[in-house]
């Protein structure tokens, strides 16, 4: 059993300890400077490395799953159901967490991204789901969040008739934002780390989609009365819709923790400049951010979440929403496995294609194996 720093976190927000929690990591994750990008962008840029969380290639959903799995264990569940996109990081980590605690994972994959090629639909997170033994079902719609959750309810009903005891992780707005508590704890962790090294953070930038990470973090900084501005970079919805969602979710988190009416709309900052053409779709902003991070810092981002978040951060600096010289923290939420579903789109960023790749003078499509020569 690993020794957790959770006791240290609940000294600042004791109500985080009101809820059952299944420990998946010991924490804290690394907070470190990005010196090369700082010079390039004209700010003091730091990164919070939640991509390094130690479960099935990591990512921010590990923090959220501690609370969902805690409740599932309390309810003596034997099966976990979740829904997400085809290259869902949440689904991959949910399957891993379910296996860790002896439960069967059932994953519903939604057609959110109009990609029919094999690399997107069979590699990356999809391959990892299969390696984890998850049962995969498909949902043909990609933008019907309510019906996707309802379909999980239908599957769960059939399982109960067969004697199973399923636990459902709903992602829709009509269900409790239990997983957001993981990011309220993360906000406390981040503030404690910054205080230890006397770092005064002016801005924190993170991706915002389901809004559980964004609302949880905003609730945490609000309860702690930390002055940093939280910027959510939209990955799925337009800013107007996302602002409304984050506001609602943050106040729901506040209610769960005993802090009603925690924030007003002025506390919610979202930006959708880098969103088009839509969820899981590359654009020039995102391509530039992914390439900059890899070549200047050796840090891999993904096209869906972390890549768009850094692209949004760069935009906020260049548009002077974030002034030069300020201390800026970027939350790396993980998502690295999804890159393998985007190989044909990512290779051209580096001047790579099947026509110019050579291994021992052979193209990748050659039938000759140099190891057998």
Image (cartoon, grey):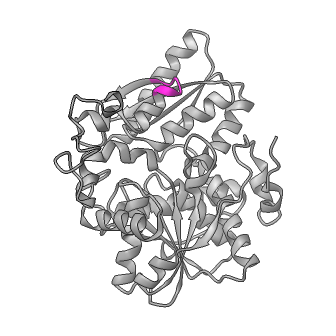
- Is 209 magenta? The answer is no
Name the quadrant containing residue 50: bottom right
The spot of residue 275 in percent (x, y) is 30, 61
The spot of residue 212 in percent (x, y) is 53, 54
- In this orientation, which residue lies closer to the viewer: 367 or 111? 367
The residue furthest top is 162
182 sits left or right of 135 in the view: right
Number of marks drawn: 0
25 sits left or right of 142 in the view: right
Would you place residue 179 above or below residue 238 in this image?
above
Quadrant of the drawing holding the C terminus? top left
Would you place residue 234 above or below residue 61 in this image?
below
Residue appearing at x 34%, y 83% in the figure: 318
- In this orientation, which residue lies closer to the viewer: 31 or 242? 31
Residue appearing at x 28%, y 53% in the figure: 346
- In this orientation, which residue lies closer to the viewer: 320 or 366? 366
Q: Write the start and end of the magenta stretch as one range.
A: 130-135
Residue appearing at x 48%, y 61% in the figure: 246
């Amino acid at each position: 059993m690993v020794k957790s720093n959770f006791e240290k976190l609940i000294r600042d927000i004791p109500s985080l300890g009101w809820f059952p929690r299944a420990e998946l990591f010991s924490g804290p994750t690394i907070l470190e400077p990005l010196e090369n990008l700082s010079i390039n962008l004209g700010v003091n840029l730091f990164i919070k490395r939640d991509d390094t969380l130690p479960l099935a290639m990591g990512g921010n959903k590990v923090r959220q799953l501690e609370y969902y799995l805690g409740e599932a264990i309390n309810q003596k569940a034997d099966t976990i159901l979740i829904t997400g996109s085809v290259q869902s990081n949440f689904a991959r980590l949910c399957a891993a967490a379910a296996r860790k605690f002896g439960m069967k994972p059932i994953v519903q994959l939604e057609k959110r991204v109009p990609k029919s090629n094999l690399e997107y639909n069979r590699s990356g997170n999809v391959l990892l789901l299969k390696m984890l033994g998850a049962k995969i079902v498909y949902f043909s719609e990609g933008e019907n969040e309510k019906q996707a959750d309802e379909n999980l309810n239908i599957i769960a009903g059939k399982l109960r008739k067969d004697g199973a005891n399923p636990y459902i992780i709903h992602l829709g707005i009509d269900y409790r934002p239990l997983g957001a508590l993981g990011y309220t704890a993360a906000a406390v962790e981040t503030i404690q780390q910054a205080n230890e090294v006397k770092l005064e953070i002016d801005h924190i930038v993170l991706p915002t989609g389901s809004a559980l990470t964004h609302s949880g973090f905003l609730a945490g900084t609000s309860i702690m009365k930390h002055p940093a501005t939280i910027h959510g970079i939209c990955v799925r919805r337009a800013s107007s819709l996302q602002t409304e969602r984050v506001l609602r979710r943050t106040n729901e988190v506040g209610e769960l923790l005993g802090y009603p009416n925690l924030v007003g709309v002025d506390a919610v900052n979202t930006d959708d400049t880098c969103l088009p053409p839509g969820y899981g779709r590359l654009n020039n902003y995102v391509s530039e951010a992914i390439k900059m991070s890899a070549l200047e810092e050796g840090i891999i981002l993904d096209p869906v979440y972390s890549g768009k978040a850094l692209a949004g951060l760069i935009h906020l600096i260049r548009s002077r929403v974030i002034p030069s010289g300020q201390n800026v923290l970027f939350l790396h939420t993980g998502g690295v496995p999804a890159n393998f579903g985007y190989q044909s789109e990512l290779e051209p960023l580096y001047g790579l294609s099947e026509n110019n790749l050579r291994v021992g003078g052979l193209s990748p499509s050659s039938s000759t194996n140099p190891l057998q020569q």
